[in-house]
């Protein structure tokens, strides 16, 4: 199996494999690699390891060398230029009255190409804009349309949980998420409750979905005291997943107070009757 090293070009970005050429790299090291766009500046995300050939997208490019302080200075200069380019491009888009929303700008490491990322509802004819920008920046221009999930990943932000959104912190690639995952976890199907900043279903809906589908050794009743496997904590069961649709013996509603009134069940497990029938 070939030996490779994983390199990222953006924070929480996708990891690409490169040939380390008998050099040993450590996670976090800055390197210069050969790509289809030319030389690029990246960071080692995965140390040298052997992987099956089917996991490698040919051709396998090489890691040219470790980045020098001069290379890092050049990257900092590129970042400063990108901020200026972003404001100029936004002004040009307004002048051309194009229905597009500018997200980010990126210079290649050698400065030979400037890439603008944008979102739009439909296809946009930006040929005049490209010619205008090429004349302004005197370099090759590429406008790349991206989706709303990629936009959220680039811009970042805080999710409903109060933490930085997953895609901007540690998710390298997006995974499919469906409404079925929310149903299996008995979550609210209100779009405002299960949608992220991008307006799509939250990526975290799939984190525990497999555990909800796993068969349990024995059913637990509401009110049962359970202890964690590592014995570091304990909790009380407040809801159970029905083993089979229509099975009244596994319906969690029948094993907890209905909460409609004190005279209905007086705090005892509800029998499903109407108010007053359990008095």
Image (cartoon, rainbow, N blue to C red):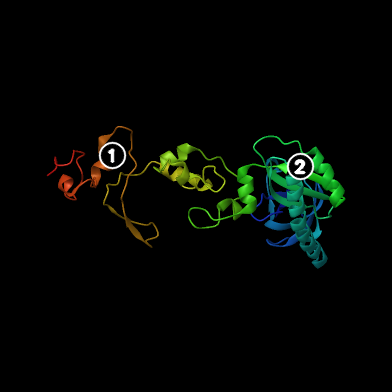
The residue sitting at 23% across, 45% down in the picture is 260
Q: Nearer the viewer, residue 262 or 252?
A: 262
Rendered location of residue 154, percent (x, y): 65, 51
Of all residues shown, which one is farthest toward the bottom?
69
Q: Is residue 1 something that shows in the picture?
A: no
Q: Nearer the viewer, residue 145 or 128?
A: 128
In this view, 82 is above or below 279: below
The residue sitting at 29% across, 42% down in the picture is 252
Q: Badge 1 is on which residue?
A: 251
The residue sitting at 21% across, 39% down in the picture is 272
In this view, 172 is above or below 68: above
Q: Is residue 144 left or right of residue 205?
A: right
Rendered location of residue 129, percent (x, y): 79, 42
Q: Are marks 2 and 1 in contact (CB under 8 Å)?
A: no
Rendered location of residue 57, percent (x, y): 73, 42
User: SS for tag 2?
Assistant: helix
* Quadrant (top left, top right, bottom left, bottom right) of the C terminus: top left
Q: Earlier in the sequence, mark 2 or mark 1?
A: 2
User: SS for tag 1?
Assistant: loop
| Alpha carbon distance from label 2 to label 1 | 60 Å
Q: Badge 2 is on which residue?
A: 96
User: Residue 112 got which mark?
Assistant: none
């Amino acid at each position: 199996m070939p030996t490779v090293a994983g390199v990222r070009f953006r924070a929480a970005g996708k990891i690409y494999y490169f040939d380390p050429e008998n050099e040993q790299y450590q996670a976090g090291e800055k390197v210069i690699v050969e790509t289809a766009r030319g030389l690029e500046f990246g960071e080692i995300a995965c140390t040298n390891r052997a992987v099956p050939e089917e996991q490698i997208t040919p051709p396998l490019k090489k890691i040219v060398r470790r980045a020098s302080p001069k290379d890092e200075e050049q990257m900092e200069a590129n970042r400063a230029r990108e901020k200026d380019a972003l404001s100029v491009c936004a002004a040009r888009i307004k002048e051309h009255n194009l229905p597009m929303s500018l997200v980010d700008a990126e210079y290649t490491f050698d400065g030979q190409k400037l890439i603008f990322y944008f979102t739009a509802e439909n296809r946009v004819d930006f040929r005049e804009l490209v010619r205008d920008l090429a004349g302004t920046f005197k370099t090759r221009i590429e406008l790349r349309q991206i989706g709303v999930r990629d936009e959220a990943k680039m811009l970042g932000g805080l999710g409903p949980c109060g933490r930085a959104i997953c895609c901007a912190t540690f998710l390298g690639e997006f995974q499919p998420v469906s409404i079925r995952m929310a149903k299996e976890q008995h979550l609210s199907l209100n779009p405002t409750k299960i949608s992220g900043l991008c307006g799509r279903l939250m990526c975290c809906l799939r984190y525990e979905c497999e555990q909800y589908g796993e068969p349990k050794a024995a059913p637990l009743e509401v009110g049962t005291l359970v202890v964690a496997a590592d014995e570091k904590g304990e909790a009380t069961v407040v809801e159970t997943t029905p083993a089979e649709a229509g099975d009244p013996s596994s319906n969690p509603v029948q094993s907890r107070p209905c909460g409609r009134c004190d005279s209905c069940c007086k705090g005892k497990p509800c029998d499903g009757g109407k108010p007053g029938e359990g008095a």
